[in-house]
Image: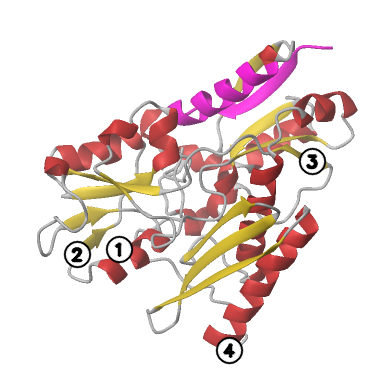
Amino acid sequence: MRALRLGTRRSALATTQSGWVADLLRRGGHEVELVEITTHGDVSRAPLATIGGTGVFVSALREALVADGVDLAVHSLKDLPTSPADGLALAAVPAREDPRDVLVASGGRTLAQLPAGARVGTGSPRRRALLQALRPDLEVVAVRGNIDTRIGLATSGELDAVVLAAAGLARTGRLAEATEVFDADVFVPAPGQGALAVECRADDAEVVAALAALDSPADRLAVAAERQVLSGLEAGCSAPVGAHARALEGELDLRVVVQAPSGELARRAVRAPAADEGAARELGAAVAADLLAAVFGGRSPRAPAAAGGTQDHPQDRPDDGPRPDSESGS
């Protein structure tokens, strides 16, 4: 088989994630070279909601795939638009990293231990809504930057704490710096958080076959349900929506949270059989339809982002050359 050209964003977190996928392919006997690509989201400092949402971290990689500049591309699945791209296939969802959110606070404190009025940083509307529901007294501050930048805001004392994705810290060997790992049933993660998406051209049978060996069926089912919730709610990058699914003995356990127009959080927890992606998407769609009818009167919860806020995601920002908090990491 030919050497595979793997397209990746240039940030430290993105190249770490892509390197992990490359190593999996190499263990299967494939030769892989990384091709670094700069996306608009990496060079712009404008809020994500104003430059196209998390899709801005994906478009340049997809363009390179279509143009045959690379053979496959690795994305933080949290950044991947819910609508499919013509001619491309989501060929693999590898084993998922920890999908939970974490707190990094000065003095090793937990959320409950932070003083009244503490300043906590995040660029995610979802995290903002969850923080304010748990601790209405907090001052939630919009932040941008890569993992180093955001952790530095807490360790320097500029902020009392920041909220990041466990996945980004784990992949970069910094999970020990988290002072609290939030319960995913309460502090519900973003759809797809912790998972990677590997895309290739749909008609490239050789690469499709190579990537099939990397796929985790259980994680693919889980993220299919989560992403269908997001799609069903028509929630753009500024919408405060969390969705987390787990495959359990032939069933999916799905937890969803969304911020209602009143500011209160609406939650749903369902469990149903899901033997394939179609059933997983049906479950996600049913929960989304229920929330639209019961909470939003049938209207989309799409809303403007908080001042300075970005979508829920992280990988690092332009600070390191540049992902986004995107979850990309964080």
CA separation in Å, label 1 and label 4: 25 Å
The residue tagged with tag 3: helix, strand or loop?
A: strand
Q: Residues within 10 Å of mark 3 (few under 14, many from 20)?
A: some
Q: Which residue is mark 4?
A: 297
* Sooner in the amino-acid sequence: mark 1 or mark 3: 3
Residue contact between numbered discs 1 and 2, judged by CB atoms under 8 Å: yes
Viewer-proximal residue, 320 or 91? Answer: 91
From what the image shows, is residue 196 above or below residue 4? below
Q: Amino acid at mark 2?
A: Leu
The residue tagged with tag 2: helix, strand or loop?
A: loop
Q: Quadrant of the C terminus?
A: top left
Residue contact between numbered discs 2 and 4, judged by CB atoms under 8 Å: no
Of the numbered discs in the image, which one, if any, rests on residue 138?
Answer: 2
The residue tagged with tag 1: helix, strand or loop?
A: helix
Q: Residues within 10 Å of mark 1 (few under 14, many from 20)?
A: many
Where residue 153 appears, as percent x and y from the top left, is 21, 42
* Sooner in the amino-acid sequence: mark 1 or mark 2: 1
Q: Is residue 307 visible?
A: no
